[in-house]
Amino acid sequence: MKQTTVKTGETTVARREALNETKVWQVFARRKYEEPLHEIGNVMADDVELAKAYARSIYDEFSWIEMVLVPRESIVTVIAS
Amino acid sequence: MTTHTGIDNEALFALLSSLADNKQAVGRRYAYWCNGAPALEAAVAAAAMTQDELGHARTLYPLLEDFVQGQADLVQVEPMTRTLHYHLSALDSDFVGWSDFVATNFLLDTALTVFFAAAQNSTYEPLRQRARKVVQEEHIHFVHGAGWVRRLASAGGAVRKALLDSLQKIWDETLCWFGPTDDLSMQRLYQEGIIDATPDELRSRYLYKIMPVLGSLEIVFPVSFNAPMKTWEVTQPLAWTRWESVGRRWSQK
């Protein structure tokens, strides 16, 4: 795999860091209408549209009838583990 | 026109060949990045899109043997034996970086999808069936491409510059792919109801799709929106001197 060489003085590492994702989205889905949404995993993406694309490509093992994303930062802990 | 041996339609054969070759080449280029994307999530998405692109190519190549033009040289209807490569010249070489992946995903893949969208009510049934499925699958590709264009453009500095260079690299040739205004193949497909738009209309639909994303990021290309006509137009001549009408691609420099 070729890495891009940067002529402007920035290192590849710096460019990678500039693209580090910071936002985590919890992914919930269900396969049947009578089944409640349940957590199936998470994705990291600062862009919500990218988060949707990631969730669909990563969690494609079933034909979900519904899938939603919840930003982890919006989850309120009631009883901590 | 259908004969007892097959369909005799050089224009349709040429377009199907170009679509199949471009899908095949895009899939192969994507494949190199399935384990090299900047994030694990992006790598999985790249793998999924690779499968989709190669899958689209695999559904198109078998159509070629139904044509008189394909039967004249069966070597050219099999992707494994085919020696003609009617994909964009930009795909002749590897992507130099992730930004090349993103540019191809956003610009070229979207251009091909605009063509498929124009064939969803095609009078040529095999293309109509495939077009609907391709358009459905490509929706998520566009979301991915647009998302990464926003991501790279917003990062600024060298990251944004690399993206701009990658977009610039395939911009003109992608616009050329729809053909000149009087493109014989595209015009014939339009007249026969195989697609529902002329080359200029296809180009306008394409720009209508991508320019809101680029405009919101202050990425400027020589195009403008003609408000009275409600069409997007190219404001700078494209490099038609490099255009090879048979291969629907630029000649190598």
Image: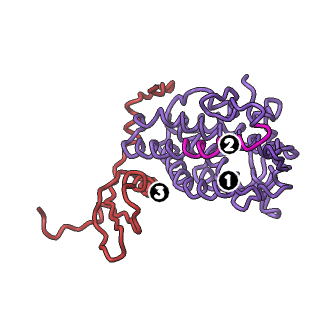
Chain colours: A red, B purple
Q: Which residue is mark 1?
A: B116
The label number, if any, that marks residue B19 in the structure image: 2
The label number, if any, that marks residue A22 in the structure image: none
Magenta residue span: B54-70
Q: Is residue B57 magenta?
A: yes
**Cα gap from disc 1 to disc 3, whole angstroms:** 23 Å
Specify whether B136 is left or right of B252.
Answer: left
Foreground pick, B4 / B230: B4
- Report the chain holding disc 2: B
Mark with earlier residue (2, 1) = 2
Hey, what amino acid is under mark 2?
Leu
Q: B27 above or below B229?
A: above
Q: Mark 2 Cα within 10 Å, few/some/many (few <14, many 20+)?
A: many
Foreground pick, B185 / B83: B83
Hey, what amino acid is under mark 3?
Glu
Hey, what amino acid is under mark 1?
Phe
**Judging from the image, what secondary structure is the residue with disc 2 in?**
helix
Q: Are marks 2 and 1 in contact (CB under 8 Å)?
A: yes
Is residue B9 among the parts visible in the rendering? yes
**Judging from the image, what secondary structure is the residue with disc 1 in?**
helix
Q: Is residue B18 magenta?
A: no
Dominant secondary structure, magenta: helix
Q: B71 above or below B216?
A: above
Q: Which residue is mark 3?
A: A49
Specify whether B169 is left or right of A65.
Answer: right
- Report the chain holding disc 1: B
Q: Could you tell me which quadrant the C terminus of chain B lies in?
A: top right
Rendering coords of residue B99 (x, y %):
52, 37
